Image: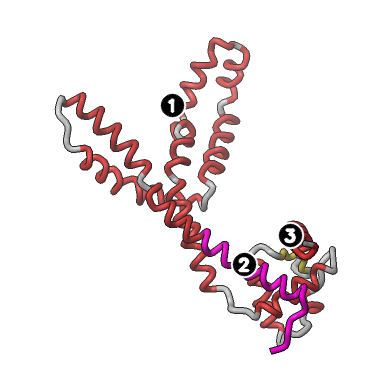
Amino acid sequence: MRRMPENLALIVSRIKRRATVRSCLAVAGMIAGAPLCLHAALILGTLFWISIGRMLHFAYPWSYWFWGTALLTIPLLFRMEVRTNGDYLGEVARDLDHDQRTSSPSLHAAAVMPAAFLGAVAYHAAANPRAATAGFVELFITGPRWVLAGARHLRLVNKIPKVSLERTAGVVRTLLDHDRGLEPKDLLGDFESRDELQESLIWLAFYGWIGVSKSGDRVYIYSESRRFLTAQSSN
């Protein structure tokens, strides 16, 4: 086997390490996220246990409330995370912005009359309870988010093509010499076909090394990737 040039060997090492690290982080996120999925059940189940016990002057075992709440909240949180595609707070903020535009008189009153501020807050909390509880839901949804993100990454890892790391590193090395990027045809180099080049570009894009122009006619290396590789090669 021929020996790779020193700088090419360094690039191979770095791109391989990033792939390994991201897979490890995905697994770690799933492991850490699994117990976090029980946060909502732990907090809400305990609140139900205390409040219902005080109202009825007797209480079922805490575990009943915990597991009962878990059976309800965990599927709902996963469904919510999938539906919002990881942007729950963003969706709530957009809804709140719409409500603010459509209810400007009450907001104006709160701004002009400080005494009306608390009333306005209470009014909007009642009118949009989703916004009022968004912070708690975002906390509860952390576990499902980590689990789904890790599972999604591992699923995509199995779908992206297997590539020659040496040839893929050659693409990175070529792009390092061109600040404005190159057309894909200029990156063919040692590749036997355009399909092989395309597979390497997909692999590099998946792991965050390169980007593609909006028109799709140029490929460039990200500035962060360039700084990272340049700093490593100078050490």
Above or below, 108 against 177 in this view is above
State the residue at coordinates (53%, 64%). Answer: 23
Q: Nearer the viewer, residue 18 or 91?
A: 18
Instruction: From the viewer's perspective, tell me whether residue 51 is left or right of residue 25.
Output: left
State the residue at coordinates (58%, 16%). Answer: 109
Q: Amino acid at mark 2?
A: Arg
Q: Magenta region, mostly helix, strand or loop?
A: helix
State the residue at coordinates (59%, 67%). Answer: 19
Q: Position of residue 59 (x, y in %)?
A: 17, 32
Compute the Cα span from label 1 to label 2.
Answer: 51 Å
Q: Position of residue 176 (x, y in %)?
A: 81, 67
Above or below, 207 against 96 in this view is below
The magenta stretch is: 1-25
Q: Nearer the viewer, residue 221 or 95?
A: 221
Instruction: From the viewer's perspective, tell me whether residue 105 is left or right of residue 60.
Output: right
- Image quadrant holding the C terminus, namely bottom right
Circle number at residue 228: 3
Q: Secondary structure at mark 3?
A: helix
**Residue for badge 1:** 126
Compute the Cα span from label 1 to label 3.
Answer: 50 Å
